[in-house]
Image: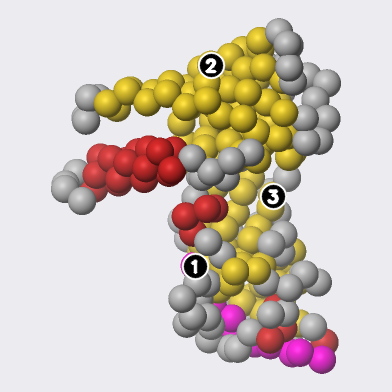
Amino acid sequence: MRIEELMPNTPITLMVNIDGQKLTFESKISEVYPRRHLVLADIIYHNDKIVTFRAKNIIIDVLINTGNEKPEIFKNVTVTLVKKKDGSLCYNLATIAESKTYNRRQNFRCYVGISTSFQCGPNKAAHLGVIRDVSVNGFSIVCDEKLPLEQNQIVHVVLKDYIEETNEKFVFHLYGLIARTQELDNKSILYGCRLNNYLPALEAYIMKKERLRLKRTSGGDL
């Protein structure tokens, strides 16, 4: 699906990533002009202020529920605040890429924040870092030093965690390939990695962590 094929009044979710901080906003498609490749969406307010989406290093994906079993996602959408002829404001959504089927479970990233050591390649010295988050198909590490890592270079990290509420210990040996490198605002370096293989126990761990997080947030049973 191309973005100009969307219909007016279609609800959308803007999934925003700003230097690793993830936010979501709800809006809907207001007008579509296929011949001009122009798609407009309703304005979003936060704390009585218009959200402009002008932050540095911002990445925006647009999630669409098409009514099918799985939603569609447009990656790296440019969202621009524009003014209509009547003076009202809206967003212009622009991307040349077609949408892809969105797998919520595969794309869900669970925050971990656990210190560890990791190795890059065979027989390499260990480096200190923090496992920031993990998903069923990848993980990210943050460290204070910039390492000479190349795309698709293998990384080995051990994730050790203890969940007090369930009195469970978890140990995972994660082997991944470098997918991206990003310098954060505090000058530390984030390394995003794709997992080499699927680990069913890791998926169970992620779902358990998220369930407990939601339980703490809601203050009740889930």
Mark sitting earlier along the chain (3/1): 1
Magenta highlight range: 26-35
Q: CA distance from mark 2 to mark 3?
A: 28 Å
Rendered residue at 67%/17% (across/down): 119
Q: Nearer the viewer, residue 76 or 68?
A: 68
Provide the secondary structure element on which disc 3 rests.
Answer: strand
Provide the secondary structure element on which disc 2 rests.
Answer: strand
Whether the magenta-drawn stretch holds residue 34 is answered as yes
Mark sitting earlier along the chain (1/2): 1
Labels 1 and 2 touching (C-beta < 8 A)? no
Labels 3 and 1 touching (C-beta < 8 A)? no
Rendered residue at 57%/58% (across/down): 15
Numbered circle sitting on residue 46: none
Which amino acid is tagged 1?
Glu
Residue closest to the far left: 221
Which amino acid is tagged 2?
Thr
* Quarter occupied by residue 185: top right
Q: From the viewer's perspective, is residue 209 above or below residue 163?
A: below
**Looking at the picture, how far across and down is residue 89, in whole percent?**
65, 75
Mark sitting earlier along the chain (2/3): 3
Residue denoted by label 2: 116
Q: Residues within 10 Å of mark 1 (few under 14, many from 20)?
A: some
> Which SS does the magenta portion mostly show?
strand
Rendered residue at 74%/90% (across/down): 33
Q: Can see residue 18?
A: yes
Rendered residue at 69%/49% (across/down): 58
Residue denoted by label 1: 26
Numbered circle sitting on residue 58: 3
